[in-house]
Image (cartoon, rainbow, N blue to C red):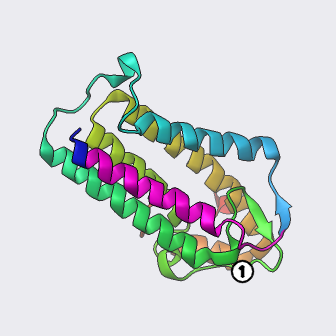
């Protein structure tokens, strides 16, 4: 990957991290939370996914290429990574004081359906997946694919756990939202978790 592409991706992801740190304290108190172990597992897998796709890391056999080198894929990857960062930050801003890095219900929790939440129910997760997809394409190495697989698995499980919490808190209102808006893919609504069994 070119040095410029490396730098753009690294700065974008660092901007995301700084935004998360700066806004992490401006949240409501927690009413209900998933187990500490599951929350650590989700967040640990997400961190590992970012590390695997990190442009400057070297990991021996995992550095083997799965895509040919060339500027077109690097540019597409950088654009996706930057777009994913922008989407995740926009969603985090829209969520406001309801946000948590763990699966929680906040005191006075509101169901947000505006901004990115009108497009996809889990836009921060979707943004994270797009970031790692972009990093994997720009990198073109097996470790990027492994990072993408870990991110999708972690966020799929975390998102499904979060859905159960939100259904318990908001009932029919959240079930309607599930029918109207896709889980991780925009414009792809599905049956509710309760309907799916």
Q: Is residue 53 above or below residue 106?
A: above
Q: Which residue is mark 1?
A: 110
Based on the picture, tell me whether residue 25 belongs to the magenta stretch. yes
Task: Identify which residue is drawn at 49% across, 60% down.
Answer: 16
Answer whether residue 181 is visible to the viewer in this image. Answer: no
Question: Element type at marker 1?
Answer: loop
Q: Which quadrant would residue 94 be assigned to in this image?
A: bottom right
Q: Quadrant of the N terminus?
A: top left
Answer whether residue 178 is visible to the viewer in this image. Answer: yes
Q: Nearer the viewer, residue 32 or 56?
A: 56
Disc 1 crowd rating (10 Å Cα; few below 14, some 14-19, many 20+) is few
Secondary structure character of the magenta stretch overall: helix
Task: Identify which residue is drawn at 35% across, 28% down.
Answer: 142
Q: Nearer the viewer, residue 40 or 11?
A: 11
Q: Position of residue 89 (x, y in %)?
A: 49, 68
Q: Nearer the viewer, residue 197 or 161?
A: 161
Q: Position of residue 83 (x, y in %)?
A: 35, 63
Q: Which residues are magenta?
A: 5-29
On the rendered structure, is 62 left or right of 31? Answer: left
Task: Identify which residue is drawn at 82% across, 47% down.
Answer: 35
């Amino acid at each position: 990957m070119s040095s410029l592409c490396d730098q753009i991706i690294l700065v974008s992801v660092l901007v995301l991290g700084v935004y998360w740190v700066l806004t992490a304290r401006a949240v409501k108190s927690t009413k209900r939370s998933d187990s500490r172990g599951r929350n650590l597992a989700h967040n640990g897998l997400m961190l590992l996914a970012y590390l695997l796709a990190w442009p400057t890391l070297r990991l021996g056999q995992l550095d083997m290429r799965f895509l040919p080198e060339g500027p077109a894929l690097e540019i597409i990857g950088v654009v996706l990574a930057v777009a994913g960062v922008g989407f995740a930050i926009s969603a985090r801003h829209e969520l406001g004081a309801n946000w948590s890095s763990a699966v929680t219900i906040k005191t006075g929790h509101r169901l947000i359906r505006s901004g990115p939440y009108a497009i996809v129910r889990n836009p921060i997760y979707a943004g994270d997946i797009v970031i790692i997809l972009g990093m994997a394409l720009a990198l073109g190495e097996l470790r990027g694919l492994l990072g993408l697989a870990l991110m999708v698995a972690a966020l799929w499980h975390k998102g499904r756990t979060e859905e159960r919490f939100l259904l318990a808190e908001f009932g029919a209102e959240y079930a309607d939202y599930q029918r109207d808006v896709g889980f991780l893919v925009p414009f792809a609504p599905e049956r509710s978790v309760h309907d799916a069994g």
